[in-house]
Image: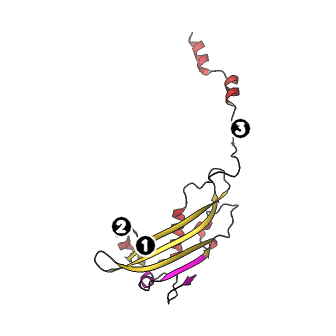
Amino acid sequence: MKASSHKSWNPRRFDARAFAEAEGVLDGEEPLASFDRLAAEIHADGAVGSAVRWDAQGQTRPDAAGRSAVWMRLRAALDLPVGCQRCLAPVVVRLEVDRWFRFVADESVAEAEDDQSEEDVLALEPKPDLLALIEDELLMAMPLVPMHEVCPQPLSVSGGELPDEEAAGEARPNPFATLARLKK
């Protein structure tokens, strides 16, 4: 992790206001193992050596009332080996996040403004954990049903092979024919 501005920023207790006022830039590469919830999504046969690459940029912009508002752009990317929902083999999904966040005074203000705002609103206090935010955003970027475009092995039918349509038609009598005979 490196900071390009004059100050070293602590991503675990992130001072978003000072970061934005300094137009700070911070980037890093964290091992996937340091993100417990993301690591729990790894397929049993998947590689754990992945890393989360991320960067953050802070800035201030005037809000509607002309006051200085704190903003941060967050980008993160990860190749995560998860289970294909079709064949159950590992499939690597690319997770990418590129979002802007606006910071407000506290949780109550963030909650009140979040529903009316188009942008994501976060609280300045308590100081957010930037790495937890990265993990949250990557988890939300996961596909609901991860699958290969084309599975590497043919899919097997768990109840055996499907019967051949022609052979099945010859072997089974038509139930409606039996009903027609009973009606006579």
Image coords of residue 22 (percent x, y): 44, 86
Density class for disc 3 (Cα within 10 Å; few <14, some 14-19, many ≥20) is few
Residue 63 — which label?
A: none
Density class for disc 1 (Cα within 10 Å; few <14, some 14-19, many ≥20) is some
Magenta residue check for 5: yes
| Residue that numbered label 3 is attached to | 161
Give the amino acid at mark 2.
Ser
Residue 51 appears anywhere in the view: yes
Residue placed furthest toward the bottom: 6
Residue 129 appears anywhere in the view: no
- CA gap, disc 2 and disc 1: 11 Å
180 relative to 17, above or below:
above
Q: Is residue 104 left or right of residue 149?
A: left
| Residue that numbered label 2 is attached to | 117
Give the amino acid at mark 1.
Phe
Q: Residue at x 56, y 12 (%)?
A: 183
Magenta residue check for 121: no
What's drawn in magenta, residue-wise? 1-29
| Residue that numbered label 1 is attached to | 101
- CA gap, disc 3 and disc 2: 54 Å
Density class for disc 2 (Cα within 10 Å; few <14, some 14-19, many ≥20) is few
25 relative to 50, above or below:
below
Q: Looking at the figure, which quarter contains the N terminus?
A: bottom right
Image coords of residue 87 (percent x, y): 66, 50
Tag 3 secondary structure: loop
Give the amino acid at mark 3.
Glu
Q: Residue at x 56, y 64 (%)?
A: 95
Tag 2 secondary structure: loop
